Amino acid sequence: MIKVYGIPNCGSVKKAREFLENRGVGYEFVDFKKCPPSKELLESWVKEKGIDVVLNAKGMTYKKLRLKEKNLSTEEKITACLENPSLIKRPVILGGKELIIGFDERSYEVVFC
């Protein structure tokens, strides 16, 4: 079963869910605010994609926390994401061996169609 991780009111998450629903692709939605990812799960995403892909450096939370100014290590960035799941780029889609972070319609077409 495909899992879509994110925040329900996030524009990119809405686009991803709509994409999947319009193509009849079943998925389970996991709300970061109600069920944040475990450290192990987040570390697996970082190991596969890299912290620069997982961490949403363009988001409001990143800017509000002034993380750019703090020159954090990867481990410190992971800790920040665990404490503030809205720092994680959304959506995170996990299905089988596929891990997709962010909304990219072309990538979705290749994987889900």
Image (cartoon, rainbow, N blue to C red):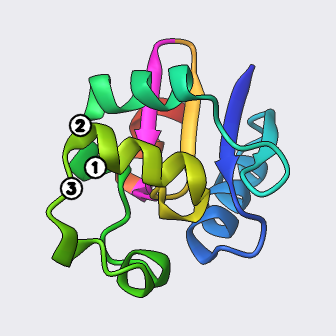
SS at mark 1 in the image: helix
Q: How many marks?
A: 3
User: Quarter holding the N terminus?
Assistant: top right
The answer to the question of whether label 1 and label 3 lie on touching residues, with beta carbons closer than 8 A, is no
Q: Is residue 113 visible?
A: no
Where 9 sits versus 97, above or below? below
SS at mark 3 in the image: loop
Where 96 sits versus 14, above or below? above
Q: Quadrant of residue 43?
A: top left
The residue to which callout 1 is attached is: 53
Residue at point 69%, 68% (across, down): 14
Q: Quadrant of residue 33?
A: bottom right
Depth check, front residue: 52 or 110? 52
Residue at point 40%, 57% (across, down): 104
Percent x, y of residue 2: 69, 27
Q: Amino acid at mark 1?
A: Val
Mark number displayed over residue 50: 2
Q: Is residue 8 magenta?
A: no
Mark 3, residues whose alpha carbon is within 10 Å: few (<14), some, or many (≥20)? few
In the image, the segment drawn in magenta is 97-105
The residue to which callout 3 is attached is: 72
User: Quarter holding the C terminus?
Assistant: top right
Question: How far separated are the C-alphas under marks 1 and 3?
Answer: 15 Å
Mark nearer the viewer, 3 or 2: 3
Mark 2, residues whose alpha carbon is within 10 Å: few (<14), some, or many (≥20)? few
Residue 78 placement, left or right of 37: left
Percent x, y of residue 27: 78, 34
The answer to the question of whether label 2 and label 1 lie on touching residues, with beta carbons closer than 8 A, is yes
Where 30 sits versus 94, above or below? below
Residue 64 placement, left or right of 27: left
